Image (spheres, rainbow, N blue to C red):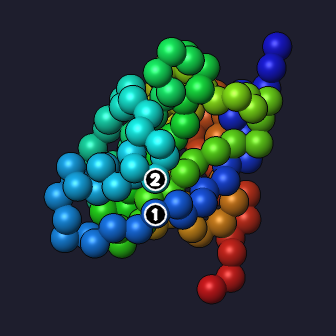
């Protein structure tokens, strides 16, 4: 069985004016990622989590989070063996089995250090970064 999730990486891939509407912010992300389909959209007061998937490829999904306070779009990835992307079932596992919403609800936590995400546990902070 392939390892799923693990150490999380977050990379800023786009920035938007935080005063822009969510629709405009999403349009900018879709433009930056070659217009995939939105498979999941989960909105929080401080963040927006999108799961985008390439049409016709059910195993091509990627996770993106908008920090609504800073306007930064993050690509969220994991050091696992899902090199071609994730499925909608993987997204559901991340949200339900890993309690990933706990981290996304507070997007400022993403940059605090290294996170480890695994089914059956909430996100675990591995080490804090120095500012």
Res 4 quadrant in image: top right
Image coordinates of residue 128 in percent, x first then y, are 68, 70
* Rendered position, 98 above or below 69: above
Whichever of callouts 1 and 2 sits on the residue coming sooner in the sequence is 1
**On the image, numbered disc 1 is attached to which residue?**
14
The structure residue drawn at horizontal position 69% and vertical position 60%, both measured from the top left corner, is 114
- Inspect this view and state whether residue 101 appears: no
Quarter of the image containing the C terminus?
A: bottom right
Asked whether, in this view, residue 72 is left or right of residue 1, the answer is left
Res 121 quadrant in image: top right
Give the structural element (helix, strand or loop) at label 2: helix
The structure residue drawn at horizontal position 57% and vertical position 67%, both measured from the top left corner, is 111
- Inspect this view and state whether residue 34 appears: yes
Circle 1 Cα neighbour tier, 10 Å, few/some/many (<14 / 14–19 / ≥20): some
Q: Nearer the viewer, residue 71 or 106?
A: 71
Circle 2 Cα neighbour tier, 10 Å, few/some/many (<14 / 14–19 / ≥20): few
Q: Nearer the viewer, residue 3 or 38?
A: 38
Quarter of the image containing the N terminus?
A: top right
Q: Nearer the viewer, residue 24 or 99?
A: 24
The structure residue drawn at horizontal position 52% and vertical position 60%, both measured from the top left corner, is 13
Image coordinates of residue 59 in percent, x first then y, are 61, 20
* Rendered position, 60 above or below 115: above
Asked whether, in this view, residue 113 is left or right of residue 44, the answer is right
**On the image, numbered disc 2 is attached to which residue?**
32
- Residue 77 badge: none
Q: Nearer the viewer, residue 17 or 92?
A: 17
């Amino acid at each position: 069985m392939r390892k799923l999730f693990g150490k999380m990486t977050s990379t800023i891939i786009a920035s938007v004016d935080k005063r822009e509407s969510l629709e405009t912010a999403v349009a900018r992300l879709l433009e930056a990622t070659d217009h995939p389909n939105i498979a999941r959209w989960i909105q929080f007061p401080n963040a927006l989590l999108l799961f985008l998937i390439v049409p016709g490829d059910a195993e091509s999904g990627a996770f993106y989070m908008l920090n609504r306070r800073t306007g930064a779009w993050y690509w969220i990835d994991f050091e696992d063996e899902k090199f071609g992307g994730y499925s909608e079932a993987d997204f559901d596992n991340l949200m339900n089995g890993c309690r990933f919403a706990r981290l996304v609800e507070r997007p400022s936590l993403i940059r605090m250090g290294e996170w480890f995400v695994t089914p059956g546990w909430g996100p675990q902070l591995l080490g804090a970064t120095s500012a």
